[in-house]
């Protein structure tokens, strides 16, 4: 049986030739993301902003402008009427009225009865009400867990590899997160708690990728002690290329299926993950690796392995290498 | 590395079988396996975001607790100063006022300050291990006493009150006839209520929003007051010993005596009924023996006067007493609808909440959205899995088959472990699931690519497979440890949905490494030993 090979054996693509261009583009993208976040802001859902979201499923796609006008009359302030998933599914977000729980309930009832009156065949699919207090907490805990996870991961990589690798991983994670935020600022897709989970998934995936490349770099640094660093990085990326393509391919197929056929509620979520696969793969090659050059990683960064044929590392050797 | 002694093989199979067995109850209807004891067949339940239902987060109203404690302390101080009935150890106090956090009063006879202090000490309790007390007692200007509630005292009171509140909330939710509600304390001052399938949580919120503190007070008729007092009362300032209470369901208010005639503590029954005269919905209540005795005595002594029935400080009705009421039954009217009378009856029956609770978060998902999500999710998940398995097969052949079997075990084991730990599957949980499946696939890709590479370098079959597993394991190990670190931090610092993600991720990483590395290696080793191939296709 002839098996499928997506990547030919022994490729020799000089990825890192473009490292300066890539880095310039990446920095620009990061800057653009920040600018977008600054200018557009993130379309925070009620999870992080407080307020009320009512999701309505219509039989036929309603006229959004008309709907917006109808609801604008009911609830003063910052009302958002958006499609989610399809043109028939509309998400209506309103700020919570001043006052107590009863006021919020009345506002929700008014909204629901208006929709029922105007569109008798529409069904209310969900109602989320989050007070300012809770949304503040959710934002804080979400940001904290993201921040702490990134730092802890970098420290672990520093211990297992070298400090340069820790910084490389930290920077490429920063890159991934910044670009994903930029994507949400650009598209104005709703940014909610589920998106934080998607962001964490992207970090997890990107990290996986970075570690695979780093592991090979470490191995090659011990094996080819005379090789130039750029050449060595290129070799490492090429050697792991078939794995990178395969794994990304698997993830892309799974996510594309979920995006097209999956439930509407996870559309933003799947879109973020799909984007994250590209960003994460790219950053492992063009962020995590070149940083090692600038931070002057060389064969001396790791202790050579005496007597072990082919440079096969054992766990004990690794620990010794990391401790130096 | 390719050496698998019998005990190791048995242990691996045992782990797989146990994990897979625990996943079965999730897939079959409970009725089909009802012969197994409930505790032996845990299921993975779908979160409300997938299955539909209501999630309500309640928080103790600390400001209300603070105010309540202050007025309770005022009462306790008065009582403590009064001394034993009939004895002469009364201590005269005056100018009692409550500020934001403290009760201040004057001891008339400065010589008795020490004794006052002693009596006040009895009213405070120690909190925690630091020797702090629930109230600080301070003397100012010789004879002025300031009692301030400490933060520790307040926190302690709230967390104890929440235990009672949880039970009452549970009674109320159950009284609504909902199925399988989950009611848990969160932190020191919050309660999460989750009711699967509940579509309109309005009734539930109405029910939980009322403290249901029932009190009967005598009405102070305006006619009995001086014109000045009447004018004051109209502006909400009542004469000494009285208070002005607004009506709950209609405009206006009543001046009532501060003294509680009888309270909801003495209640044994409350039910919704109809007034026999005008057919209006009412709440019928009945007091216990002691309550009935008091009620009968007070009504006998006050024939011709009116008393007010208050719930949570608002007057529902203020009927006249026509004759002594014996038997301890009463009827509360007050512009009820059938629903609101029923809600009120349930609230009264379940007892008063020790703290006022307010809804700070509410999420309701309709059944259509939930069912739609599950149906689409299942289809998409099925296709994605099938595509992965197929691709694995055509890319890695026999090794792909091994990986696919391991992947199937992996999915079953994740579900089994989740059922065992009682976790629910939410949308973020599915994200964690996808990530771990990705990690499991990646582990096999890493291993198989490495074996290919080693074969290309001219290694013999055994050596290539052995090196492939050894070299790939290092990156797999590092990648997964970092994910576990991240998941742990998310679990500790994240909130609800992120926690759900972290739990699934942690479970999934463990099973993924186990099935992706250990189980496939066992299969490969077994085959290699048996077939002893001189070349392999991978």
Image (cartoon, coloured by chain):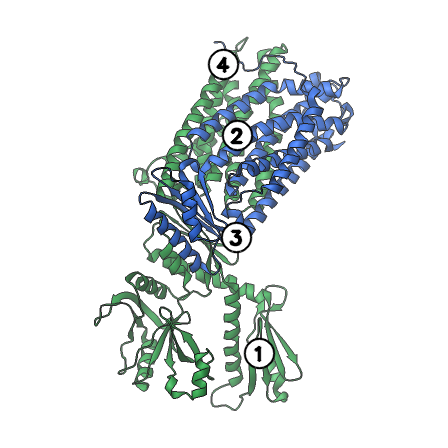
Chain colours: A blue, B green
Q: Nearer the viewer, mark 1 or mark 2?
A: 2
Q: Which residue is mark 4?
A: B530
The CA span between labels 1 and 2 is 66 Å
Looking at the picture, tell me which residue is in the foreground, B214 or A100.
Answer: A100
In screen coordinates, is B117 left or right of B267? right
The answer to whether any part of residue B180 appears in the image is no
Q: Which mark is residue A134?
A: 3
The CA span between labels 4 and 1 is 86 Å
The CA span between labels 4 and 3 is 61 Å
Dot 1: chain letter: B
Please report the residue visible at 60 percent of the width from the left and 30 percent of the height from the top: A206
SS state under label 3: helix
The CA span between labels 1 and 3 is 38 Å
Looking at the picture, tell me which residue is in the foreground, A57 or A47.
Answer: A57
Q: Residue B460 lies in what quarter of the image?
A: top right
* Residue B45: % across, % down: 40, 42
Q: Which residue is mark 1?
A: B120
The answer to whether any part of residue A35 appears in the image is yes
SS state under label 2: helix
* Residue A265: % across, % down: 44, 38
The CA span between labels 3 and 2 is 30 Å
């Amino acid at each position: 049986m002839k098996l499928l090979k997506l990547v030919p054996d022994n490729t020799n693509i000089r990825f890192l030739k473009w490292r300066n261009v890539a880095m310039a583009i990446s920095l620009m993208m990061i800057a653009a993301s920040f600018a977008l976040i600054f200018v557009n802001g993130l379309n925070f859902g009620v999870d992080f902003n407080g307020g009320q979201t009512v999701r309505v499923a219509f039989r036929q796609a309603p006229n959004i402008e008309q709907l917006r006008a109808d609801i604008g009359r009911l609830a003063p302030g910052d009302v958002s009427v958006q499609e989610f998933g399809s043109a028939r599914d509309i998400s209506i977000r309103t700020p919570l009225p001043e006052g107590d729980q009863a006021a919020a309930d009345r506002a929700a009832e008014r909204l629901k009865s208006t929709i029922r009156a105007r569109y008798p065949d529409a069904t209310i699919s969900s109602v989320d009400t989050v007070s300012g207090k809770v949304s503040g907490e959710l934002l804080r805990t979400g940001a904290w867990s993201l921040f702490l996870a990134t730092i802890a991961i970098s420290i672990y990589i520093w211990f297992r590899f070298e400090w340069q690798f820790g910084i490389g991983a930290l920077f490429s994670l920063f890159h991934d997160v910044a670009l994903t935020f930029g994507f949400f600022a650009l598209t104005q897709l709703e940014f909610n708690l589920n998106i934080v989970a998607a962001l964490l998934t992207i970090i997890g995936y990107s990290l996986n990728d970075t570690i695979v490349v780093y592991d090979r770099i470490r191995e090659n640094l011990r094996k080819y002690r005379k090789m130039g660093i750029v050449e060595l990085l290129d070799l490492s990326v090429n050697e792991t290329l078939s794995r990178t393509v395969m794994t990304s391919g698997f993830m892309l197929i799974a996510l594309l299926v979920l995006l097209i056929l999956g439930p509407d509620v996870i559309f933003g979520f799947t879109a973020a993950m799909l984007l994250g696969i590209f960003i994460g793969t790219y950053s492992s090659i063009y962020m995590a690796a070149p940083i090692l050059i600038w931070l002057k990683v060389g064969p001396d960064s790791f202790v050579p392995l005496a007597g072990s044929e082919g440079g096969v590392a054992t766990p004990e050797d690794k620990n010794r290498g990391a401790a130096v | 590395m390719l050496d698998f002694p019998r005990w190791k093989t048995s242990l691996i199979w045992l782990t797989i079988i146990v994990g897979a067995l625990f996943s079965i109850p999730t897939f079959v209807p409970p009725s089909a396996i009802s012969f197994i004891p409930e505790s032996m067949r845990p299921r993975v339940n779908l979160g409300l975001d997938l299955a539909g239902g209501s999630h309500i987060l309640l928080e103790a109203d600390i400001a209300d607790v603070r105010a309540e404690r202050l007025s309770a302390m005022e009462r306790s101080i008065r009582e403590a100063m009064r001394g034993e009935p009939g004895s002469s150890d009364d201590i005269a106090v005056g100018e009692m006022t409550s500020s934001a956090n403290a009760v201040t009063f004057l001891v008339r006879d400065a010589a008795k300050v020490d004794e006052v202090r002693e009596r006040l000490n009895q009213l405070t309790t120690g909190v925690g291990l630091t020797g702090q007390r629930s109230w600080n007692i301070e003397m100012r200007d010789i004879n002025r006493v300031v009692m301030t509630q400490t933060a520790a005292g307040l926190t302690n009171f709230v967390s104890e009150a929440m235990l009672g509140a949880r039970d009452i909330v549970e009674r109320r939710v159950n009284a609504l006839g909902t199925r399988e509600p989950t009611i848990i304390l969160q932190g020191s001052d919050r309660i999460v209520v989750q009711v699967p399938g509940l579509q309109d949580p309005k009734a539930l919120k109405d029910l939980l929003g009322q403290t249901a503190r029932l009190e009967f007070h005598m009405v102070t008729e305006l006619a009995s007051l001086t014109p000045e007092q009447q004018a004051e009362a109209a502006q909400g300032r009542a004469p000494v010993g009285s208070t002005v209470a607004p009506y709950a369901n209609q405009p206006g208010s009543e001046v009532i005596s501060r003294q509680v005639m009888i309270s909801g503590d003495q209640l044994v029954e409350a039910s919704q009924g109809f007034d026999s005269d005008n057919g209006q919905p009412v709440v019928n209540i009945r007091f216990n023996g002691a309550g009935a005795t008091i009620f009968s005595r007070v009504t006998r002594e006050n024939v011709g006067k009116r008393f007010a029935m208050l719930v949570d400080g608002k007057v529902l009705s203020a009927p006249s007493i026509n004759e002594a009421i014996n038997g301890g039954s009463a009827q509360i009217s007050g512009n009820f609808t059938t629903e609101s009378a029923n809600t009120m009856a349930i609230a009264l029956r379940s007892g008063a909440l020790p703290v006022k609770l307010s809804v700070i978060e509410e999420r309701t998902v309709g059944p259509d959205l939930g069912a739609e999500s599950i149906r689409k999710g299942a289809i998409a998940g099925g296709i994605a899995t099938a595509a992965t398995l197929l691709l694995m097969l055509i890319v890695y052949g026999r090794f792909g088959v091994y990986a696919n079997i391991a992947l199937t075990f992996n999915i079953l084991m994740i579900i089994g472990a989740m059922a065992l730990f009682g976790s629910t599957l939410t949308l973020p949980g599915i994200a964690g699931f996808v990530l771990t499946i990705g990690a499991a696939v990646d582990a096999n890709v890493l291993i198989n690519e490495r074996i290919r590479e080693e074969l290309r370098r001219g290694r013999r079959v055994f050596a290539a497979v052995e090196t492939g597993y050894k070299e790939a394991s290092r990156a797999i190990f590092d990648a997964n440890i970092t994910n576990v670190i991240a998941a742990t931090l998310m679990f500790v610092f994240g909130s609800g949905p992120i926690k759900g993600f972290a739990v699934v991720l942690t479970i999934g990483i463990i099973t993924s490494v186990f099935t992706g590395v250990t189980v496939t290696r066992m299969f490969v080793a077994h085959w290699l030993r048996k077939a002893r191939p001189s070349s392999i296709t991978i």
